[in-house]
Amino acid sequence: MAIFEGAGVAIVTPMKENLEVNYDKLEELLEEQIAGGTDAIVICGTTGESATLTEEEHMRTIKFAIDKVNHRIPVVAGTGSNSTATATQMSKEAAEAGADGILLVTPYYNKATQNGLIKHYTTITDEAKVPAILYNVPSRTGCSLAASTVAYLAKNAEYVTAIKEASGDISHVADIMHACDGAIDLYSGNDDQIVPILSLGGKGVISVLSNVAPKETHDIVALFMEGKVKESCELQLKALPLVHALFSEVNPIPVKAALNLMGKEVGPLRLPLTEMEAAHQAVLAEEMRKFGIKLA
């Protein structure tokens, strides 16, 4: 059974002005997402600024989300690292805290071989013993999962159950699904490719868009799954200008700006990320209005 089906929000980590994690605000965001129809919470992923959280903050934030969601919807914990030992320890802690799944980005900077990736993922999942989602995003990591590697892990690593595909290469996604032959669940890692990935057998999306439009992102998947492909595609296409604005600068710069424009007060970003440029923010605000999102 899939960890979740539908739209999982890659939720931001709100910060206070002094750059401490704002847990009160995080609780508000979690409640709003659940009320908005989001199908799963993905905590401490790229959008959650995991790269600039300390390990202590990282684990506290994961445990906080698990406790506050309290089994209402699945919680997937981002526990990937370019250190296999670090990823293993965080994954074990997340599993012990009650995470429904873990999200494991390919080890960035190291540029592991495919054999190294197999060993990396097998080591983590054998220790953590919780359903794991591989995360392929070569534009950020300098490392890509080959279709044959995904298939090997899906068929031989007991807890590897899914992949978040953010390569942007639909042909590569098709190769993965062919090689896995039904042995893996697929999630889109790109909000502009939800419907194409659903058409290849996807279960849903791990979404940045869901931060500002949870119902609509959920509906894109739900309509497709109900056989209303035309309606799903129409909603996907309607969202494209907003999605483009949300990625006009590196994620999560624009989505945090968008939430602040909505009055959510999610605070600033930690360096080296900086605030969104004024020209880009003006376009973002306009696309949010066009999409029907109320600004503060």
Image (cartoon, helix red, strand yellow):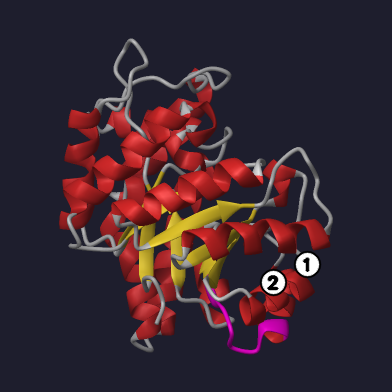
122 vs 175, left or right, is: left
Where is residue 200? Give x, y as percent. 59, 81
Query: Which disc number belongs to residue 146?
Result: 1
**Residues at marks 1 and 2, CA–CA distance in whole angstroms:** 6 Å
Where, by quadrant of the figure, is residue 98 drawn? Answer: bottom left
Quadrant of the snapshot with the C terminus: top left
248 part of magenta stretch? no
User: Where does residue 178 sit, x and y in percent of width and height?
Assistant: 70, 85
Q: Which residue is mark 2?
A: 150
Around disc 1, counting alpha carbons within 10 Å, would you say few (fewer than 14), some (14 to 19), or many (20 or more)? some
Outermost residue toward the top?
18
Q: Residue 225, can we see it?
A: yes
**Quarter of the view holding residue 135:** bottom right
Q: Which mark is residue 216?
A: none
- Which residue is rendered at x = 47% and y = 20% of the image? 270
Q: Is residue 48 above or below residue 232?
A: above
Residue 85, horizontal then vertical, whole percent: 61, 44
Q: Position of residue 248 (x, y in %)?
A: 57, 36
Q: Nearer the viewer, residue 227 or 10?
A: 10
Along the horizontal axis of the image, is 114 left or right of 183? right
**Are circles 1 and 2 on residues that touch, CB within 8 Å?**
yes
**Residue 293 visible here:** no
Q: Amino acid at mark 1?
A: Ala
- Mark 2 lies on a secondary structure that is helix
Q: Is residue 178 left or right of residue 37?
A: right
What's the magenta region?
A: 179-186
Identified at 33% across, 18% down, the residue is: 20
Q: What is the three-letter code of the residue carrying label 2?
A: Val
